[in-house]
Image: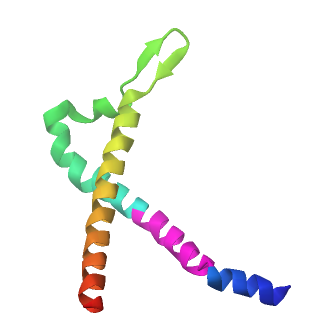
Amino acid sequence: MIKDFLGFLKEYKIVGLGLAFIMGAASTSLVKSMVNDIIMPIIDPFILGESWRNASLEIGPIALKWGSFLAEAINFIILAFVVFLIAKKILKEEKIKKK
Protein backbone atom coordinates (compact mmCIF):
# COMPACT_ATOMS: atom_id res chain seq x y z
CA MET A 1 0.00 0.00 0.00
CA ILE A 2 2.84 2.41 0.86
CA LYS A 3 4.65 1.60 -2.40
CA ASP A 4 1.47 2.34 -4.33
CA PHE A 5 1.07 5.63 -2.49
CA LEU A 6 4.69 6.67 -3.16
CA GLY A 7 4.27 5.63 -6.80
CA PHE A 8 1.16 7.79 -7.01
CA LEU A 9 3.04 10.79 -5.56
CA LYS A 10 5.88 10.35 -8.06
CA GLU A 11 3.72 9.59 -11.09
CA TYR A 12 1.45 12.61 -10.69
CA LYS A 13 4.17 14.89 -9.28
CA ILE A 14 2.09 15.75 -6.20
CA VAL A 15 5.05 17.18 -4.27
CA GLY A 16 5.84 19.60 -7.10
CA LEU A 17 2.21 20.61 -7.27
CA GLY A 18 2.20 21.30 -3.53
CA LEU A 19 5.33 23.42 -3.81
CA ALA A 20 3.83 25.33 -6.74
CA PHE A 21 0.69 26.00 -4.69
CA ILE A 22 2.74 27.35 -1.78
CA MET A 23 4.81 29.56 -4.11
CA GLY A 24 1.61 30.78 -5.76
CA ALA A 25 0.16 31.81 -2.41
CA ALA A 26 3.40 33.59 -1.47
CA SER A 27 3.58 35.40 -4.80
CA THR A 28 -0.06 36.45 -4.44
CA SER A 29 0.66 38.27 -1.19
CA LEU A 30 3.82 39.77 -2.67
CA VAL A 31 2.04 41.12 -5.75
CA LYS A 32 -0.91 42.31 -3.65
CA SER A 33 1.52 44.29 -1.49
CA MET A 34 3.18 45.69 -4.62
CA VAL A 35 -0.20 46.82 -5.95
CA ASN A 36 -1.47 48.26 -2.65
CA ASP A 37 1.76 49.84 -1.45
CA ILE A 38 3.56 50.91 -4.62
CA ILE A 39 1.28 51.10 -7.67
CA MET A 40 -2.02 52.29 -6.17
CA PRO A 41 -0.55 55.25 -4.22
CA ILE A 42 0.60 56.58 -7.60
CA ILE A 43 -2.80 56.00 -9.24
CA ASP A 44 -5.07 57.02 -6.32
CA PRO A 45 -4.68 60.82 -6.72
CA PHE A 46 -6.00 60.53 -10.28
CA ILE A 47 -9.11 58.57 -9.26
CA LEU A 48 -10.48 60.49 -6.26
CA GLY A 49 -8.11 59.22 -3.59
CA GLU A 50 -8.71 56.06 -1.55
CA SER A 51 -12.48 56.46 -1.24
CA TRP A 52 -13.21 54.40 -4.36
CA ARG A 53 -12.03 51.22 -2.59
CA ASN A 54 -14.85 51.57 -0.07
CA ALA A 55 -17.50 52.51 -2.62
CA SER A 56 -20.69 50.51 -2.53
CA LEU A 57 -24.14 50.52 -4.05
CA GLU A 58 -26.86 50.05 -1.46
CA ILE A 59 -30.17 48.64 -2.59
CA GLY A 60 -32.32 48.31 0.49
CA PRO A 61 -30.61 45.91 2.90
CA ILE A 62 -28.14 44.75 0.21
CA ALA A 63 -24.76 46.49 -0.13
CA LEU A 64 -22.80 45.72 -3.29
CA LYS A 65 -19.16 46.62 -2.54
CA TRP A 66 -18.04 47.34 -6.07
CA GLY A 67 -14.98 49.36 -4.98
CA SER A 68 -13.53 46.42 -3.08
CA PHE A 69 -14.23 44.14 -6.04
CA LEU A 70 -12.53 46.57 -8.42
CA ALA A 71 -9.43 46.68 -6.19
CA GLU A 72 -9.26 42.87 -6.17
CA ALA A 73 -9.76 42.78 -9.96
CA ILE A 74 -6.80 45.14 -10.39
CA ASN A 75 -4.71 42.90 -8.10
CA PHE A 76 -5.71 39.85 -10.17
CA ILE A 77 -4.84 41.47 -13.48
CA ILE A 78 -1.41 42.52 -12.25
CA LEU A 79 -0.77 39.09 -10.70
CA ALA A 80 -1.82 37.35 -13.92
CA PHE A 81 0.49 39.62 -15.92
CA VAL A 82 3.44 38.89 -13.63
CA VAL A 83 2.79 35.14 -13.86
CA PHE A 84 2.55 35.48 -17.65
CA LEU A 85 5.92 37.24 -17.81
CA ILE A 86 7.57 34.62 -15.59
CA ALA A 87 6.03 31.73 -17.54
CA LYS A 88 7.05 33.28 -20.85
CA LYS A 89 10.64 33.66 -19.63
CA ILE A 90 10.76 30.07 -18.29
CA LEU A 91 9.18 28.58 -21.41
CA LYS A 92 11.57 30.55 -23.61
CA GLU A 93 14.52 29.14 -21.67
CA GLU A 94 13.09 25.62 -22.02
CA LYS A 95 12.87 26.02 -25.80
CA ILE A 96 16.47 27.19 -25.95
CA LYS A 97 17.66 24.20 -23.89
CA LYS A 98 15.75 21.72 -26.10
CA LYS A 99 17.40 22.98 -29.30
Residue 2, x across and y down, in percent? 82, 87
Count of marks, rendered view? 0
Residue 4, x across and y down, in percent? 79, 85
User: Residue at left 28%, top 58%?
Assistant: 81
Q: Is residue 65 magenta?
A: no
Q: Is residue 14 magenta?
A: yes
Residue 72, x across and y down, in percent? 38, 43
Residue 79, x across and y down, in percent? 34, 57
Residue nearest the viewer, comparing 33 with 85: 85
Reply above or below: 35 against 99: above
User: Residue at left 30%, top 76%?
Assistant: 91
User: Residue at left 50%, top 73%?
Assistant: 20
- Give, as a single range, the part of the protein colored magenta: 12-27
Left or right: residue 28 compared with residue 89: right
Reply above or below: 34 against 5: above
Residue nearest the viewer, comparing 68 with 9: 9
Quarter of the image for the N terminus: give it.
Answer: bottom right
Main SS of residues in magenta: helix
| Residue found at the far top of this picture | 60
Residue nearest the viewer, comparing 93 with 85: 93
Left or right: residue 59 compared with residue 90: right
Quarter of the image for the C terminus: give it.
Answer: bottom left
| Residue found at the far right of this picture | 1
